[in-house]
Image: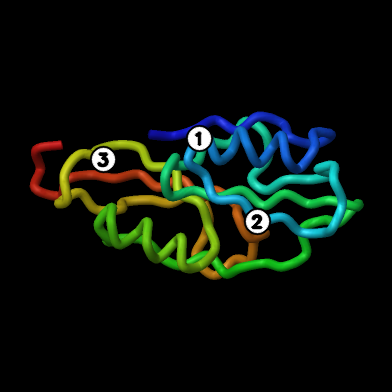
Amino acid sequence: MDVVLANYVGATVTDASNVLKWNRLEIEVIGDGDVVTAQVPEAGARVSGGSGFVVLYTNGEMPQSTVEVPDLSGLSIYTANNVAASAGLNVSMSGSTNGSTATVVSQSLEPGVRVPRGTVIRIEMRYMDGND
């Protein structure tokens, strides 16, 4: 189930972490401050509860490390989610997401581009048997 992220900038790390954990999201904190100064993904982004994560920045730290977007086309839901997570990306899925035979037909970020760790990649799933 997707979780729509709130704006945690200005919140304490403790408060933001408690809400994110309640939504079954992993948290990574960059910096040693007590107040969130930036977040990835941004407020309003949809991430998968139970497998998504949020990077919280403190003390004026800003996203600097980037990850390369993998090519997810043709992969199953399970494999695409694992590949994206291993690359440091969150996944938001749409289309035919029930069952294990649906495959990725499109993705919102071009393979090979570099984006901040934690960025959400939206993937569209379809059954390729013509019944979707």
Q: Looking at the picture, how far across and down is residue 25, in whole percent? A: 52, 44
As drawn, is 127 to the left or to the right of 55?
left
Q: Residues within 10 Å of mark 3 (few under 14, many from 20)?
A: some
Q: Looking at the picture, how far across and down is residue 36, in whole percent? A: 81, 43
Q: Quadrant of the C terminus?
A: top left
Q: Nearer the viewer, residue 106 or 59?
A: 59
Q: Determine which residue is flagged by label 3.
A: 97
Q: Residues within 10 Å of mark 1 (few under 14, many from 20)?
A: some
The amino acid type found where label 1 is placed reads: Asn
Distance (Cα) linking label 1 and label 2: 15 Å
Q: Determine which residue is flagged by label 2.
A: 28
- The residue at 10%/43% (across/down) is 130
- The residue at 46%/67% (across/down) is 86
Indicate which label's residue lies in the foreground, 2 or 3.
2
The amino acid type found where label 3 is placed reads: Thr
Secondary structure beneath disc 2? strand
The amino acid type found where label 2 is placed reads: Glu
Q: Nearer the viewer, residue 97 or 8?
A: 8
Of callouts 2 and 3, the N-terminal one: 2
Secondary structure beneath disc 1? loop
Of callouts 1 and 2, the N-terminal one: 1
Distance (Cα) linking label 2 and label 3: 28 Å
As drawn, is 104 to the left or to the right of 44?
left
Q: Determine which residue is flagged by label 1.
A: 23
Q: Looking at the picture, how far across and down is residue 1, in whole percent? A: 38, 34
